[in-house]
Image: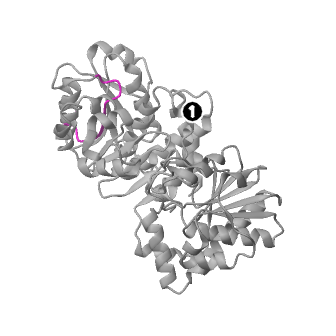
Amino acid sequence: MDELLSVAEMYRADQLTIAAGVPGPALMEAAGAAVVRAVCERWAPHPTAVLCGPGNNGGDGFVIARLLLEAGWPVRLALLGTRSALAGDAAVAAERWPGPIEAADPYILKGNPLVIDALFGAGLTRPLDGLARAIVEAMEGRTVVAVDVPSGLHGDSGRVLGAAPQAALTVTFFRRKPGHVLLPGRTLCGEVVVADIGIPDRVLDGIAPQTAVNEPSLWSHRFPWPALDGHKYARGHAMVLGGARMTGAARLASVAALRAGAGLVTIACPPEAFPVYAAGCASVIVDPLEDAGAFARLLQDPRRNAVLVGPGAGRGAQTRAAVMAALDARRACVLDADALTSFAESADELLDRLDQRCVLTPHEGEFARLFGDSVGMDGDKLSRVRAAAARSGAVVVLKGADTVVAAPDGRAVVNVNAPPDLATAGTGDVLAGIVLGLLAQGMDGFEAACTAVWLHGEAGRALGPGLISDDLPGALPDVLKALKAQG
């Protein structure tokens, strides 16, 4: 499991390691050595400026400068602040530095040296200003190696506090932090190396992190592969509410649900749209809704065990009624697009009815319309999605290049495999359909959502530039074969 540790959790990991007998200076030496190894593996010796800050990140910088100097690199070290103000392990590291200490200033970057950014670590909480900001801004266009995170990047949110440099390489320690994978932090960090500095994995038992990178190790052991003695009804019967006008959305979702493994998929649609849906994928059942109560009656069949409402459904009373019918039937539900926006003026009516069998898949606009100020829209993405899941009791998937999935119990993942090519019409409908197909096969909401987001990203990566949403369901078989081969 690729855990993501908050700044506070990483501080706790350090504390537990030191309490177990590993001295703080030894951890700092190991951190500095790890950065030097990464630098020497990528660049030949050439002029290097090591910029040290007033805290432990700066202490790492003193170690890095000393080890590079010993390896024959031409090094200049500059300190933001005074040597007398350094304390603890950073003061010890400074005592071991044999060279001159210059005052930090943008001038040290003249001549385009390799820049080791050890000014501020992930624990920075206030925007950079004054001299610190001027130095960071002077790094623009230079090759920067960041220690822990690029200075100015918030470790928990990935947000820029005033200014932050673009790093070519970021070396962090033990585990990544959310800021390494949430945007814009993921972009600013460049290549990220996670170095082993002697912190044992067992410290995680005392931390119990609830955030991770979304990857198959989290859920692959629960993937619903077909059984040799199984049949289509054992794989679930998924229902999709089809709209009268934007018919492509429900069609994309229904085919995606089938590709994800659902045994049967039915589109329930207005009678006037029946010919359009019936002319689509031959594997999808189409059932016309003859009156206002028809959708609820279809859900009385217990074999129809998972429902998707939203894609192309249209906004208004009819969509709200379909959502309530699905909730009344106590089916596993995916609510997307119009199903969410239809409750924008009466959010509590929906949120008070949800539970962990429901998966909500909003983009940022839909998320804001449904949750608004109730989750603190100014907060970071992880915090907002966690708050939304806790408020609704449902699994919430906030889509984007750094999609976050959160469960009501506080678990959350950040997805990192989605390519920018997925930013095209209809891809969200496909994602909702994949979630639906997995729910129909019995996966719980959080695992189904995590799995679907990863599969969706892998399909996008396999297709690459030029993909359209129609391509994605057809790419799933190869993605699933590769996943199964991994065991």
Please state the extent of the stretch shown in magenta in the rendering. 299-314
Rendered location of residue 135, percent (x, y): 62, 51
The answer to whether residue 260 of the structure is visible from this angle is yes
Residue 252 lies within the magenta run: no
Give the total of numbered labels. 1
Residue 309 lies within the magenta run: yes
| Kind of residue at disc 1 | Asp
Residue at 71% from the left image edge and 75% from the top image edge: 97
Instruction: Using residue 410 as the reference point, say whether residue 31 is left or right of it.
Output: right
Rendered location of residue 160, percent (x, y): 50, 48
Where on the picture, by quarter, is residue 145? bottom right
- In the rendered image of this protein, does residue 201 appear above or below residue 51? below
Instruction: Using residue 206 as the reference point, say whether residue 40 is left or right of it.
Output: right
Q: Dot 1, crowdedness within 10 Å: few (<14), some or many (≥20)?
A: some
Identify the residue at the far bottom of this view: 21
The answer to whether residue 235 of the structure is visible from this angle is no
In the depicted view, which residue is nearer to us: 283 or 456? 456
- In the rendered image of this protein, does residue 48 appear above or below residue 95? above
Rendered location of residue 88, percent (x, y): 54, 78
Rendered location of residue 71, percent (x, y): 81, 70
**SS under mark 1:** helix
Q: How is the image coloured?
A: one colour
Where on the picture, by quarter, is residue 433? top left
In the depicted view, which residue is nearer to us: 85 or 33? 85
Residue assigned mark 1: 421
Instruction: Using residue 277 as the reference point, say whether residue 55 is left or right of it.
Output: right
Instruction: Using residue 250 as the reference point, say whether residue 342 is left or right of it.
Output: left
Question: Main SS type for the magenta part?
Answer: loop
- In the rendered image of this protein, does residue 26 appear above or below residue 258? below
Quadrant, the C terminus = bottom right
